[in-house]
Amino acid sequence: MVDCVMVDCLMLECVMMEVLMVVVLQLVFSRYCSPCDIRELFCTALGLPSSGLVHKSLRKNSMILHVPVSFRAFKINELKTEVTNRLAMLEKRVELEGMKVVEIEKCRNDIKKLREEMASRNTRYSEPHRSNFLEDNKKLTPRRDVPSYPKYHLSKETVEALRLPTFDAWQWEPNEMLSCLEHMYHDLGLVKDFNINPITLKRWLLCIHDNYRNNPFHNFRHCFCVTQMMYSMICLCNLQEKFTQVDILILMTAAVCHDLDHPGFNNTYQINARTELAVRYNDISPLENHHCAVAFQIFSQPDCNIFSSFDPEAFKQIRQGTITLILATDMARHGEILDSFKQKVDNFDYSDEEHVTCLKMVLIKCCDISNEVRPMEVAEPWVDCLLEEYFMQSDREKTEGLPVAPFMDREKVTKPTAQIGFIKFVLIPMFETVMKLFPQIEEAMVQPLRESRDRYEELKQIDDAMNEKKKSENLTMGSKKK
Ligand SMILES: [Zn+2]
């Protein structure tokens, strides 16, 4: 680059000499002027000493020997100014050209880097949607701050209703749900016992809200429902008498964080489509690992760190406990976790850390899939939301040529078929096992599950009868046509 500019400077000098020659050739002198006078005028005009080199060169120039009548030497000053201006312009041009060359070279390097980056991305992930990571951690800071988050004074009725599994989350706006979550942390004594800054608690909850995506199912309302069910189980089963406050904090916080930044496509899709998450977590619970990572990215921001008053050892305990619970929500581990709990439940020991951890894992699992525990009018819309999310996935799997699970296929699944197996073989066995430790959940939680199972079985019978009728009608139509 420096060489380039130097060459340009040399060229500028040559151009300058040409300009000077043009000026000289354009001068016209009086016939009465002596060569000496002309030399003096030139030297004055060009700012050279009168005895300089110009003398010899001018003498040799035959043009100057023919001096015209009208001598316009007074023009020389004007010409000098013009030369100076042109020189300045040329210098400026050289400078600008030099800068342009530098800029062009910089752009070339940038383009090269971008191309390389795009090429490497394209080889790793063939589709932009598959990138599930937060964009430059932009979302990690809440989009609004506490002052614009209105304080809702929860009525006595709401506070009471919040403690029950019958609570209807569909009636509440996000801000109201945030206030309810805030209330739960205060009501359980967590804010007081762990010296949590109430403003930090608000800001953390706002940040949590902002980091749930607007999926049909895995969204902030689902986070709220799971946490509210945890709160109602803590109340119903008197868990504060059995567990330490650290355990209660872990249960609540894991529930709040358990689906953070869920992309709306399950682990099977992540693994089959070889997404960034699956690659990052080696196909081992990619989503749950991601939810944990996002949760602790949020805690790493001082403004949102509700654990700021904890000493490193206590923080480590909370972190480990929260991670264990969030990772337990992977349904691929359902059999393993429930079997482990079944082995402990008949001789359950609250002083055994392994037993307590296993119970906490089962509790968060219960809450995560507890919609069918709720009244029918609250539970049923969630089935539609889940199927909508499933169909989005199966449609995409079909277009991408990936395997499609029958329970997600819109051609194969109906609401009753989707629910009956799940309630009979997953929900009831798990809740009945928990019932051994907490008999009080039978009426509040297990009975509604049995009722829901019966209702969906009736619906299935109606569906089957309708299908039979349609089939026989089609057969009759077919035979009539023949
Ligand atoms: Zn969930």
Image (spheres, rainbow, N blue to C red):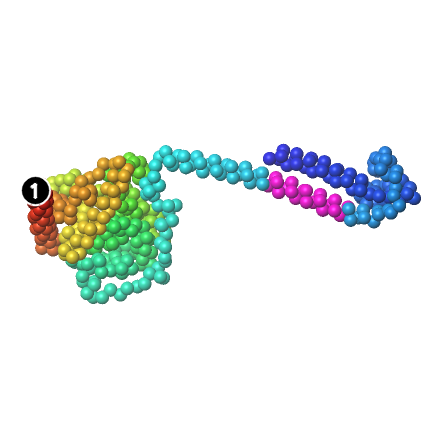
Which residue shows up at 69% across the image and 38% down it? 12
Which residue shows up at 73% across the image and 45% down it? 84
Give how far across and how far down residue 260 sits, in percent: 29, 48
Q: Nearer the viewer, residue 476 or 98?
A: 476
Q: Is residue 255 left or right of residue 63?
A: left
Res 473 seen here: yes
Q: Residues within 10 Å of mark 1 (few under 14, many from 20)?
A: few
Magenta-tinted stretch: 80-99
Q: Is residue 400 left or right of residue 81?
A: left
Give how far across and how far down residue 440 sits, in percent: 10, 54
The secondary structure that dominates the magenta segment is helix
**What is the number of callouts on the image?**
1
- Judging by the rendered image, the residue that carries numbered circle 1 is 479
Locate the C terminus and report the quarter of the image it occupies: top left
Give how far across and how far down residue 179 sits, in percent: 27, 60
Res 357 seen here: no
Q: Secondary structure at mark 1?
A: helix
Look at the image and say whether residue 98 sits in the magenta stretch: yes
Look at the image and say whether residue 236 sits in the magenta stretch: no
Which residue shows up at 13% across the image and 40% down it? 339
- Quadrant of residue 150 in the image? bottom left
Which residue shows up at 26% across the image and 47% down it? 259
